[in-house]
Image: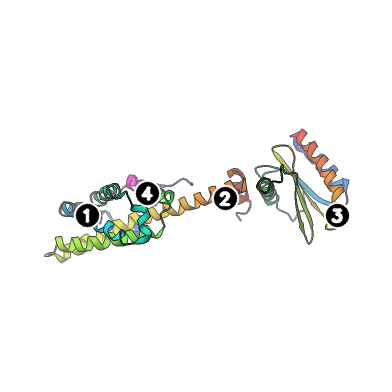
Amino acid sequence: MRADLLNSILSDLNGSSADIEASAVISTDGLMMAAMLPANLDEDRVGAMGAAMLSLGDRTAQELARGQLEQVLIKGDNGYVLMTHAGDEAVVAVLAKPESRLGLIFLDVKRAAEAIAKTI
Amino acid sequence: MKEVDFDKLMSYARAFSRYTAEREAILVEASKDIMPRLAEVTDSFYATLQTIPEAQPFIEGRMDALKGTHHQWLQGVLKGPCDVNYTEAMYKVGAVHVKVNLPVEFMAGGTCLIQESFITLVTDIYADDPARVKSVLEALNAALGFSLMVMQESYQQSSLAEELEKFLAITGMSRTLFNNLAEAYKS
């Protein structure tokens, strides 16, 4: 039931922008809760790495006096990875195309994170 | 720290150091002759340490207590038994050395000094029995090698555990997250 709801939220998120290529909901301990990922990505690795990056982002924001962490954004040649908390126990991660319009994606991800937090 | 199978560690260290039951018996037998002069080994050990600047911070103001512990340990080496309890005790010694930030080379260096003192002492005690000198020194070498190996195993594990604790504290990662991350990249 919960997995269905999470998958539905991810499906809506992926459909909200053509720039979004994949998304996932990960527990803060790094376990995959729901995912819409390309077949070539290992779910366990995406889960653990995503949660680890967000944890490090939390600590970096604290150490550098940037306040409460809102998101972690990574840019590579092939696009973006965006991670944000979805409540206290989950992380939502999104993979987006390199030419993505980030403002719109930020809004969509924020909405999705709020919905995920309510579901969990 | 991972769970330690002390039976397995004891067998492994015994095999490597060639500390056999026969050699253990040789030491027990020789302990009657060596014990009255055992303090010479401890005294020589700490006298040498005092000449090594890097060792000073670890012995200053604690000499009597350290000598007492050292002497007690050497009595155990001679009298045995070299069992699981002894293996566990040596393992804990290694962990304590990590806690006090003792450089890893101190254990191997210390063992060299102790072996050297025993060579002098045993050669003197059994001056008229070269075969006995050989067998007792072989047994001592094996017993000290066994102890060193167990301590170093513990030192390595404790060092890794301490480094991991620091890493987790710095990054804010939970141990569960770290374990999941390690598991995801296992293969």
Question: The residue under label 3 is which amino acid type?
Answer: Ser
Real-space CA distance between mark 3 and mark 4, rounded to the nearest whole angstrom: 58 Å
Real-space CA distance between mark 2 and mark 3, rounded to the nearest whole angstrom: 34 Å
The chain that hosts pointer 2 is B
The x, y position of residue A7, in whole percent, is 79, 41
Question: Split into 4 quadrants, where in the image is the C terminus of chain A?
Answer: top right
Task: In the rendered view, tell whether residue B120 sits above or below residue B78.
Answer: below
Residues at discs 4 and 1 both on one chain: yes
The chain that hosts pointer 4 is B
Q: Point out the frontmost of discs 1 and 2.
A: 2
Main SS type for the magenta part? Answer: helix
Would you say the residues marked 3 and 4 are in contact, meaning their CB atoms lie under 8 Å apart?
Answer: no
The chain that hosts pointer 1 is B
Real-space CA distance between mark 4 and mark 2, rounded to the nearest whole angstrom: 24 Å
Horizontal arrangement in the rendering, residue B74 relative to residue A18 (left or right)? left
Dot 1 corresponds to which residue?
B27
> Which one is earlier in the sequence, the residue at label 4 or at label 1?
1
Dot 4 corresponds to which residue?
B93
Dot 2 corresponds to which residue?
B167
Question: The residue under label 2 is which amino acid type?
Answer: Phe
Question: Split into 4 quadrants, where in the image is the N terminus of chain A?
Answer: top right
The residue lying toward the viewer, choosing from B88 and B41, is: B41
Q: Quadrant of residue A98?
A: bottom right
Horizontal arrangement in the rendering, residue B29 relative to residue A87 (left or right)? left
